Each structure stands twice: as C-alpha cells, then as structure tokens.
Amino acid sequence: MCNLPVKSAVVTETGPLTGLRVVETGGYAVAFTGRLLADAGADVIRISPGADPLDLEPPFFGDSGRSIQAAWYNAGKRTLALGESPAELLDLLGRADVLIEDWPPGSPLLTTDELRAANPALTQVSVTPMGVDGPRAGWKVPDIVANAMCGSASVTGNAASGPINGYGNQAAHTVGFYAAICALAARRAAVANGEYQHVDLSSHEALASCTEQVLMEWFFPEGIWKTDIAPRQGSLHWSGAYEVYPANDNHGVMVTAALRFADILLPWLLEDGAAQRLGDAEAFPNVVAMVRDLPYVMDVLKDWVATYQGEDMFYEAQRRHQPFGVVWDIEETLTRSPQIEARGYLQPVEVPGFGKVRFPGRLFRTSADRAHPSPAASVSTVDWAPRAAPPRSERRNSSRPLEGIRVLDFTHVLAGPFGTRVLADLGADVIKVGTASRSGGANSPDHPYFVMWNRNKRNVTVNMGTKEGRQIARKLAEGSDVIIENFSAGVLKRWGMDRAGLHDVNPGVTVISMGGMGQDGPWKDFVTFAPTIHALTGLTYLTNPPGEHYLGYGFSLTDHLSGLAGALAALEGLAHRDRTGEGIEVDLSQYELGLGLMAPALLDYLANGTNPEPCGNRHPFGVSAPQGIYTCEGDDRWVAICVTGDVEWARFSELSGINEPRFSSHEGRLQHADALDEAIARWTRSQDADDLAERCQAVGIAAGPVQNARDLTQHDPQLAARGFFGTTESAGRGEHGLDRFPARFNGERPPVYAGVHAIGEDTFDVVTGLLGFSDDETAELLASGALS
C-alpha cells in the first residue's frame, strides 16, 4: 500500500468511472481534465511539488485565503504534495491507471521507459501547448496567447476593439475536454492490449479545431460568405442571421432571423407594427427575397429590439419557440434564471475556513452520478492497492481505439455532429440518421457546415413520422452502443427509444440527450443555439472591452464544447458498461455546460458578491501585467503578449526598451496599465508579429501572433511540421481541406478521414447488411416512404 501523506476530498462518490485511478499534475487544462474525470467518479489524485499553484490563484473566498479557482477545478479530487524524488511518484503511478501531465517537451519529469517499467499498462496523456515536438514545442502559451494563435481572437471583437480574448479560461476548458476524451479512449486500448499507451495532445491543434467558421470559410470560400478569411464582426454570426442589439433598458438581446422566419418571426413583427419596412412589395416580393437581404432584415430587427425591455423580449421569443437570449451579467445569470433553481444546479457545500457556499454542479449529468461536487478536504494516505495486470481481450488499434463501437447519431447543426465526429475519428462506426425532408441548408452535404462536422460517418434516411420508420430506427438502436440526440426534450421517450424503453433489449446502451436546457425544468422547451447560451451565462457580457457589453465570442464556443462533452459522456457510458453491463442515461444541458465554463466567476459572486465587468484583454484578476493584444506592422496584424512577475518584466523591459520606473513593480504596472499598454503599442506598431513573438519567446516571454485561417494553414510552422491539415473527398464536392484529430496515440494520429456521404447513401447497405432485411423488404420500405 502507498502510504503517502495526502490532503483530499471525501472518498470519491460512485459514478460512471468508479474504480478508475487517475494521477494529474499541471496547470488549468490538466486540472480541468481531472475535474471532468472526478465528476464521473474517477479517483483523481492531483500532485504538486509542495503547495498546489492553483491554491495561489485569485479570486479567494473572502479573506480565508482559499482559492476559488482551486475549489472549482479540484472539486472531487484528492491533492498530494510530493517531494523532489521521482521514486514516490513512480510508486504511485505503479498503482494508477491514467497519468495526465503537462511536462515541458524534451524535459519530462519521468521518461517513457521509467513509466512503462513502473506500470506496463499505464495510459499517459501529455497535454502540451504545441505538442511534444515541432519548432514551437517549447513555447510558453497562456490562455490569451493560445486564443490569439488558434484563430479565436481573429474573429472575436470588432474593428474598433481589435482582437479580444474570450473571458474565463476557455482555452483550458476546450483542451481539458479533449484530454479527458483521449484519456478514456486510450485507456480502452491499454486494457485490451495490456500495454502502455501515450497520448500526445497538442493544445494548439485542439483549439484550432474548435473555431467554427475560421477554418470552414478557408476550406470553402465559395460559401455565402464569399471570402476565405472569416472577418471580425462583433456579435454578428458568420451566417449574418444572429446579432446582439440593445433593448430599451440597455440589456443586450441576441436575436436571429434564422429559424422559421416566415411562419413565426414575420407574423410577430407584423403584430408589433415593426414590419412596415419589410412590407415594400417592390423591394421584397416574397419572403425568400426578404431573407436574402439579411442585412436589411437584421437592421429592422435592431430597431424592433429597441422597443422592448430585454427580458420581456427574451421570454416572449421563447414562448414563440425563437432562440433569442438576453445578455445577462453574472449577478443576473444567477438571480434571474428559474432553471438553475428548479434543477438544483447550485447546492450548499462547506468551504474550509469560509463556511457554506452554493456550489455549481457538473458540466453534465448522468444516471450514475451521486453526490454534488465539493472542494477538497484532507486525509493522510493514498489507499491504492497494487493493480493486477488487466486481462487482455481482442487487440485494439491504439490510434482508433473505438473500432467496434456503434453510435446512432440523431443530431444536427454543430454541437452533436461535432461530438460524433470526434467519436468517428477515433474509430467508432457512426450512423447518422436523417430524413430527406429535413436535409436542407446546414443539414445538407451541399453546405460546407455539414461537411465540416460529419466526416467518417455513414448516412441513412429514416422517416420517423411513419410506424415502419420508427421500427427501423428502433432496430438500429437495439444494436447500438451509444445513441446521441439533440431533439426537443422527451422526443426519444415518445418513440420508446430512451434508455428505459430500450433496456430490456439493450441494457448496455448509453443514451445521450443534448438538450439546450436539459430534460426538465421550466425552461426545458426553450430553443437555444450557442449564441443564446453565451448570452444567458455571462459569457457574452464579459467577453468585451471595458465599457462594452454586446460583442461576445465571435464563434459558437459552447457548441464545440457541448459536442466534446457529448463524446466524453459516450466514453463514460462505455466504461460504465464494461464494469457493470449497464449503459447510462446522460442529460447534457448545454445551458449548464455554459454555466460550468463560467463557474469561477459564479462562485466569486456567490461567495463575495462580486459582479465583474468586462476587462478586454487584461487579466481579470491582475495576475499578469502587461497582458494584451497589440497592433503590429501590416494590415490587421496583431501580437498577444503576457508578462507575469518581475523577473519576466525585467526581460521584457530589456527587449522592448520600456523601462520607466513606474512600471518596475507588478503593482505599478497594474496601476498604470493604460500608459503601459500605450507604450507597448508604440513599440509593437512597427514590428512584424511573427518575428516579435519569436523574439519574446526566445527570452522566456509568452507571446504569439493573432492568426487567421491563412496563417494557420499556410504560415504556422508548428502545424505544418506536425501535419495537422490534410484533404479528403466528399460526395458531390470533390477534394477539400480538413483539420485532423489534434492528438497522436503512441506516435500515430488517427489515420482515417473519409468525406461526408450523400443523404441516405448508406441506407440500403445498413438496412440489408446490418439489420438483415432482404432486398425486396428494403425496396418495399423505400417505396413506402419509411426510408426517406
């Protein structure tokens, strides 16, 4: 037994990953990875040499000295301070299943040989800024630099603000979801093969894969955007059909003309007397002509919003099933939403040295969950007994560890399809189910949006409006390992295809419902897209320059992260089935996921009454100064720079020549932040962004150019060296570019990237080959419309 001193939470509660032993060591991305696994019941030990650096991160619970960041990111874990000797760590890892670390490339704390010798079946996930190799492998990349380099900042902000960094550690959250997925996927190969597995996860690649239109517009410049470089245009969505406008009480309201404009939105405008400008028969002879002039339509919506109070418009829109969202600050996010209270998202927990505080829940819920997450407490030992070698089963391909897993995909738009794309890249047989009647627009292979998120999948059409169609879908469900859907709440249950309806014939199936608001509560029928979630959770409000509140993220962040959460939930369900024979039911509320991404800010309000205001590119808690994005030589060229502490400042001062005494201390740099930013901007204005970033990194200063799609695909030496981009062919489209999976497994990236199939292309083969129907029976089903 390993009797190392440890401070710890109470014994980890039962969940889908009960029995999984995880050791983590690293910064925010690693900490979030461990938090996700701990939420699912894994026994996660967070180690650090001495005090945990997260314990020093502001904000704090009152004057207790307890870090809110540490309480959130370490909830459900045990934390252990280890000495300098690697022997103690090797002893612990000899009893572990998974190691998650962010050791510097080229100088890991332990070598592969040492780890393999200590534990031949260990799964190691290396989470590094750029990957373990490549010309920029050693770069320092905090959140603001990561967002600058991956494409995020290039589309966030507007012409006046310049590029804006998203609020709240969102780079770490994105990478953490990927790392948790990779850990569970690779663990399947480790158990099956009885062999050590190493995952090389590049944070840079992971983030670049989650920037929605940035790569899409580059790969498909012929789309409605008619450009290869996605512009930075404030809250205006790439489609031109979503934007935040001010209401008459100064709340922003995210409105859209994209959903059922003719039969819902236009009649509402007419009711309010707001459609006169749209009633010009000469200008708009029909609704199609009207929608094609989206800028004019959106201008009408802007004037209309100004006649409402923000919350009134939000609730009336949702009553009419329109995905509007009111832009709330953190206080309003927590106090104005009945959904939070109804679903018990906040529960009182004890914070040592502070007292009771309402603590946010998991990023998603499963039927195997038990206790609410809570901060760490102290125990004295790690009680892991030695592991027996896992029994080997059918050998798995390390780079396609989900081969043999079947996923039935009922999702559409971005969040669900992105999640099932991740599972398909990892080898799962994903069968995408649609109908010919609902395959228009972004749900069609003719649209680049569909092409981006639906590679590596089979495509079948099933008419769920017919009895025969529902029978076919049920037969597919009976033979599936995972079902993922993002219908309105309760649809699968009405079809008898929820877990309860399938349990007698397929007890091992995991069913994941990706509803906007979850499967219950007063908002369960609300219609949401990512911009709706951003608005309602404080993310839009805080992702702004000081004094602004309407810009927000320039792409659908929470759609990508909800997709990753869906993929993670699927892997948790498989692990639970492997252990118990039973699958799980997953209620993935994209709203609660969005709240979780803002949880430290929520806790700061709940504990301290802090209602933060936007701070632009500066660190929200003053940890780094300077921290900003500065203009450089050339058209729309920028560099992100982040300096932490006086030692780094001395290096930066020597490099930049900025050496005024008032900037010599951290406190002085915070006090004179405006003057400091102006001085840096004068210096960077004549500099080449890439060259300046290289020179900063050479002296240990975190910096990186703000990159757009052209930079990423043609000028980024790291992505080129690691072969992140490739091509494939899709039905009716021919050859086009793609981004590959952002991790390598035992040195090999997942190798298969088949383009999208035509709608219904695989229906006949699936019905005959997989379900065993005869050709004649299948022909009858086709003729009846059941397979259309």
Image (tube, rainbow, N blue to C red):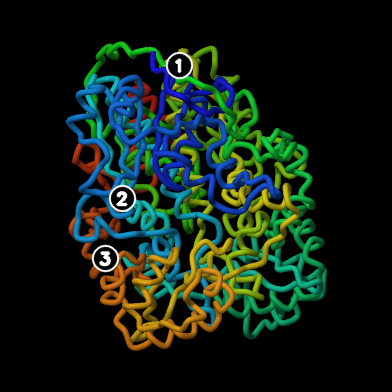
Q: Nearer the viewer, residue 117 or 211?
A: 117
Q: Using the rendered image of the protein, determine whether residue 590 is visible from the camera's viewpoint.
A: no
Residue 200 in the image: x percent, y percent? 27, 43
Q: What element carries label 1?
A: loop
Q: In the rendered image of this protein, does residue 21 appear above or below residue 211? A: above
Horizontal and vertical percent position of residue 88: 33, 26
Residue 404 occupies which quadrant of the picture?
Answer: top left
The answer to whether marks 2 and 1 mark residues whose Cβ atoms lie closer than 8 Å is: no
- Horizontally, is 130 left or right of 512 in the view? left
The percent coordinates of residue 434 (x first, y second) are 47, 42
How far apart are labels 2 and 1 at the CA level? 33 Å
Instruction: Report helix, strand or loop for mark 2.
Output: strand
- Crowding at mark 1 (Cα within 10 Å: few <14, some 14-19, many 20+): few
**Which of pointers 2 and 1 lies earlier in the amino acid sequence?**
2
- Dot 3: what SS? helix
* Disc nearest the viewer among 1 and 3: 1
Q: Residue at x 67, y 45 (%)?
A: 64
Tell me the kind of residue under disc 3.
Thr
The residue at the point 69 percent across, 76 percent down is: 302
Q: What residue type is labelled 2?
A: Ser
Depicted 746 relative to depicted 702: above or below: above
Question: Which residue sits at x=52%, y=80%?
Answer: 662
Is 14 rendered above or below residue 130? above
Which residue is disc 3 drawn over?
713
In space, the residues marked 1 and 3 are separated at their CA atoms by: 48 Å
In this figure, what is the number of numbered marks?
Answer: 3
- Residue annotated with mark 1: 383
Which image quarter holds the N terminus?
top left
Q: Would you call the spot at circle 3 few (<14 residues within 10 Å), some (14-19), or many (20 or more)? A: many
Identify which residue, 352 or 419, lies in the foreground.
Answer: 352
Q: Residue at x 77, y 38 (%)?
A: 342
In the rendered structure, find residue 202 and report the number of the disc placed on it: 2
